[in-house]
Image (cartoon, rainbow, N blue to C red):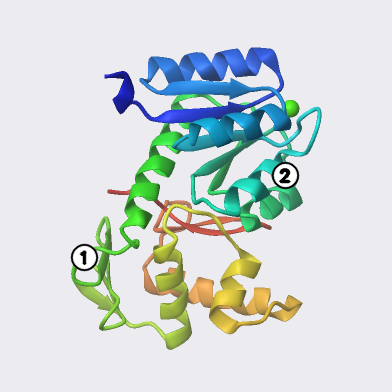
């Protein structure tokens, strides 16, 4: 059954973390190929074409972002950034360069495996153009009818403005992926200026209200302060 396993490229220079993550992934049934440097990871990527990449940013030879850029030149292989950096600018840069998500160290094995599963599933999902047959999107009780530009929750229509709808539809098309403020602003308004972040936040507050989101409770759209928004991938 070896051929049926997902192949994961793990790029991490710290030997103990590399060993730990390898053990976690292998015991969950994944095949792991590991590299400790950016150069070695480039070679492994080219020869193995893994299904997913777990990428540490702080590497001894080159920044992990270098591999990220190289891979994105010709492939949508899911990339999860594995980093001790809690710096928002690093997260934003990695996401804008095409990383699918990031995991901040230290992390538990359950979180790691959940993120890997989600990234693999979303990749399959997006390779089918991210839409359900009939031009509809469904996540829990939320249904988006792209053709009618209609949003329903539990069968009830939510009346959104054109801009609000565009934001919700955009996030749904990138479900599970953290979209940075500037990526959303560019997609919705076509410009990237300071004032637009405010505009985005105002629209998002209205969407929240119309969706009937309860403060403190998870809802369909997650906000990472200073980074962006993500439509949850796990609520199915
Ligand atoms: Ca490192």
Label 1 to label 2, Cα distance in Å? 44 Å
Question: In the shown orientation, is residue 156 left or right of residue 164?
Answer: left
Image quadrant assignment for residue 166 = bottom left
Which residue appears at 41% of the width and 57% of the height?
175
Q: Position of residue 209 (x, y in %)?
A: 43, 72
Along the polypeptide, which appears first: circle 1 or circle 2?
A: 2
Residue 234 in sight from this viewpoint: no
Q: Quadrant of ligand 1?
A: top right
Question: Which quarter of the rendering shows the N terminus?
Answer: top left
Whether residue 19 is situated above or below residue 138 in the rendered picture: above
> Residue 177 location, x and y as percent?
49, 54
- Tell whether 163 sits left or right of 105: left
> Is label 1 or label 2 in front?
2
* Residue of label 1: 154
Q: Nearer the viewer, residue 16 or 205?
A: 16
Note whether 126 is above or below 82 in the view shown: below
- Measuring 68% from the left and 58% from the top, which residue is drawn there? 226
Label of residue 66 in the image: 2
Residue 172: quadrant of the picture = bottom left
x and y percentages locating residue 234 in the rendered image: 36, 46
């Amino acid at each position: 059954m070896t051929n049926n396993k997902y192949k994961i490229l793990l790029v991490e220079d710290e030997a103990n973390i590399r060993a730990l993550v390898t053990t976690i992934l292998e015991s969950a049934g994944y095949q792991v190929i590991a590299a400790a440097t950016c150069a070695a990871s480039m070679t492994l990527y080219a020869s193995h074409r893994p299904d997913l990449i777990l990428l540490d940013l702080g590497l001894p030879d080159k920044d992990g972002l270098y591999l990220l850029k190289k891979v994105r030149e010709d492939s949508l292989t899911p990339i999860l950034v594995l980093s001790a950096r809690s710096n928002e600018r690093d997260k934003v840069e990695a996401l804008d360069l095409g990383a699918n998500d990031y995991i901040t160290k230290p992390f538990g094995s359950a979180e790691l495996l959940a993120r890997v599963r989600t990234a693999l599933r979303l990749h399959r999902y997006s390779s089918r153009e991210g839409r359900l047959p009939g031009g509809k999107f469904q996540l829990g009780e939320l249904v988006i009818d792209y053709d009618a530009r209609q949003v329903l929750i539990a069968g009830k229509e939510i009346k959104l403005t054109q801009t609000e709808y565009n934001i919700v539809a955009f996030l749904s098309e990138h479900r599970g992926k953290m979209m940075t403020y500037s990526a959303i602003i560019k997609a919705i308004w076509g410009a990237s200026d300071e004032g637009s972040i405010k505009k985005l936040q105002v629209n998002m507050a209205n969407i929240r209200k119309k969706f009937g989101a309860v403060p403190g409770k998870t809802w369909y759209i997650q906000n990472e302060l200073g980074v962006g928004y993500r439509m949850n991938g796990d609520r199915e």
